[in-house]
Image (cartoon, rainbow, N blue to C red):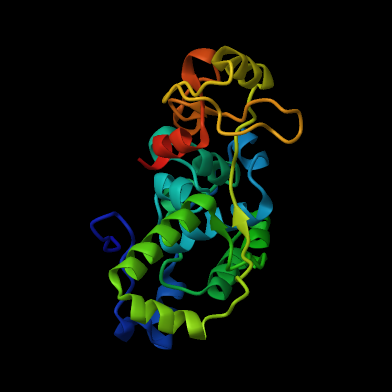
C-alpha cells in the first residue's frame, strides 16, 4: 500500500527511489484497474474541459480525495458537495476508487504509454491528460486565501520593509485566470427584498448610503444568510437587504 500523510495525501517517494531504473520496474509491474464507466453525465457536462483535466490529474497523480478535489480544484465547499461533483466527473470516465493515485510515482508520458498499451479504451482520459491546462488558473476561493495570507505576512513586517519592496515592485498588476462557480439568483427575490427594506439597511437600520446612478433607487445589497454554496435557499426568509458596510461585516466581521 502506498504511504499517505495525515490528510490522506499520497506521500512522494524518496528521491532515491525516483531513479530511472526504479521507475521502470514500477511501470513494468503495474496492472491498471478496470474502467467502470457510469451513464450519469450531469457533473461531467457542467464542468469545463480545463477543470476536468485538472480533476483527472489530481485523482490519478496526486491521489487527492473527491472532497479535496471539490475544494482545491473546483473551488466548491467540500462540506456541502461531499465530493460528489468531482466523483461524478471521474465516474463518467470510469475512474473509480482503484484509480486514485495509481500514477503517483510516474510521469504523465509514462502513464499515457501504459494506457495506450492497455486493452481498455482510455482515449478520453488520455485526451484530458494531454490538454495543456493554464498553470495560473486558480479558484476565487484560493485567490482570496492567498491574498489574506500575503496581507498578514506584509502587516507583520515593518513599514520600512514594505516601502522598500514597493519601490522595487512592478507597478502594473499581474493578470491571472480565475475559475469559479456561481449561482443564478431569482431576480424576484432580490427585488422583493429591496422593496421590503424600503431604503433602510435590515441590519443597522440606517438609510442606504447613496442612490444608484442607473435609476436613483437606494443602494442596498441582498445577502443570503445561509450561503447558496452551503445549501441555503434562494428565498425571502434567507435574505437581507444590507448597506455595503453591514454586508462586508457579515462576510468578514
**Would you identify the image quadrant in which residue 197 lies?**
top right
Please name whichever residue, 67 or 33, is drawn nearer the observer in this view of the structure.
Answer: 67
Residue 215 in the image: state x and y as whole percent: 76, 28
Q: Is residue 13 left or right of residue 200?
A: left
Q: Given the current orientation, which residue lies at the most extreme left position?
A: 6
Residue 111 in the image: state x and y as whole percent: 54, 69
The residue drawn where x is 40% and y is 55% is 64
Q: Is residue 164 left or right of residue 190?
A: left
Please name whichever residue, 176 or 148, is drawn nearer the observer in this view of the structure.
Answer: 148
Answer above or below: position of 144 versus 108: above
Q: Is residue 218 visible?
A: yes
The residue drawn where x is 50% and y is 48% is 75
Answer above or below: position of 149 versus 109: above
**Would you identify the image quadrant in which residue 123 lies?**
bottom right
Residue 46 in the image: state x and y as whole percent: 65, 39
Answer above or below: position of 231 versus 149: above
Answer above or below: position of 241 versus 90: above
Question: Which image quadrant: the N terminus?
Answer: bottom left
Q: Is residue 120 visible?
A: no
What count of labels does the image hold?
0
The residue drawn where x is 53% and y is 48% is 74
Question: Which image quadrant: the C terminus?
Answer: top left
Amino acid at each position: 500500500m502506498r504511504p499517505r500523510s495525515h490528510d490522506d495525501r499520497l506521500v512522494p517517494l524518496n528521491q532515491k527511489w525516483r531513479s530511472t531504473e526504479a521507475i521502470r520496474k514500477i511501470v513494468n509491474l503495474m496492472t491498471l484497474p478496470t474502467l467502470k464507466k457510469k451513464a450519469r453525465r450531469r457533473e461531467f457536462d457542467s464542468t469545463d474541459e480545463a477543470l476536468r483535466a485538472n480533476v483527472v490529474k489530481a485523482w490519478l497523480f496526486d491521489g487527492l480525495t473527491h472532497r479535496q478535489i471539490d475544494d482545491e480544484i473546483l473551488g466548491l465547499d467540500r462540506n456541502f458537495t461531499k465530493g460528489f461533483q468531482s466523483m461524478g466527473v471521474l465516474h463518467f470516465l470510469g475512474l473509480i476508487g482503484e484509480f486514485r493515485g495509481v500514477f503517483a510515482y510516474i510521469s504523465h508520458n509514462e502513464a499515457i504509454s501504459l494506457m495506450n498499451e492497455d486493452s481498455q479504451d482510455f482515449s478520453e482520459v488520455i485526451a484530458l491528460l494531454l490538454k495543456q491546462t493554464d498553470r495560473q488558473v486558480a479558484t476565487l476561493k484560493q485567490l482570496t486565501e492567498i491574498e489574506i495570507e500575503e496581507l498578514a505576512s506584509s502587516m507583520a513586517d515593518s513599514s520600512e520593509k514594505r516601502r522598500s519592496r514597493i519601490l522595487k515592485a512592478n507597478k502594473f498588476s499581474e493578470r491571472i485566470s480565475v475559475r469559479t462557480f456561481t449561482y443564478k439568483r431569482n431576480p424576484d427575490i432580490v427585488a422583493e427584498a429591496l422593496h421590503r427594506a424600503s431604503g433602510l439597511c435590515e441590519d443597522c437600520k440606517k438609510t442606504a448610503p447613496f442612490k444608484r446612478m442607473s435609476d436613483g433607487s437606494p443602494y442596498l445589497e441582498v445577502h443570503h444568510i445561509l450561503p447558496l454554496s452551503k445549501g441555503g435557499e434562494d428565498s425571502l426568509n434567507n435574505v437581507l437587504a444590507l448597506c455595503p458596510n453591514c454586508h462586508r461585516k457579515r462576510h468578514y466581521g
